[in-house]
Image (cartoon, helix red, strand yellow):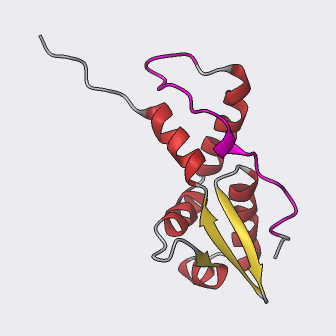
Amino acid sequence: MSNPSAVAPPDIEATPCCAPLAEARIPAEASGTLAQAFKALGDPIRLQLMSMIASAPDGEICVCDLTPAFTISSTTISHHLKVLREAGLVDAERRASWVYYRPRPGLMRRLSTLLAVDEPATR
């Protein structure tokens, strides 16, 4: 398994959120981070992993609980988790021989806000 602290994810919590796409242009400085997160979530396995991590009852989940949910190798799962970490979507903490993953809600809120579209007023 890869080292969970090898890559420091961007500090999304400290950066103010963008307006929804329907309201304003994305600032150039924010587009790279946001695009990396969307790209990370664009893979079906990573989207499923993110869902499992974000919905974990205790706010975190052990890799030992993630791996059995898939028919792919643990090495491939580790790669996908690394991509989610590098995109700033999850944090990881090693405890003994296991790694625990937690969602980073700041970036998830930014992605959600960015995609928010209000229904047009009816006449």
Whether 12 is drawn above or below 91: the answer is: above
Q: Position of residue 68 (x, y in %)?
A: 58, 84
Q: Please state the horizontal and vertical placement of residue 70, each as a whole percent of the image.
A: 57, 76
- Side (left or right) of 117 relative to 76: left
Splitting the image into 4 quarters, where does residue 23 fall? top left
Point out the residue furthest to the bottom here: 96
Q: Main secondary structure of the magenta part?
A: loop
**Magenta stretch containing residue 21, yes or no?**
yes
Give the residues in magenta: 4-25
Task: Answer whether residue 18 is magenta in the image.
Answer: yes
Give the image location of residue 48, x and y in percent: 52, 63
x 50%, y 25%: residue: 19
Front in this rendered view, residue 79 or 7: 7
**In-front residue for pair 66/57:** 57
Judged left or right of residue 107, residue 123 is left
Q: Is residue 73 visible?
A: no
In the image, residue 24 lies at what x, y percent? 51, 16
- Confirm whether residue 17 shows in the render: yes
Q: Quadrant of residue 72?
A: bottom right
Which residue sits at x=50%, y=77%?
58
Numbered-mark total? 0
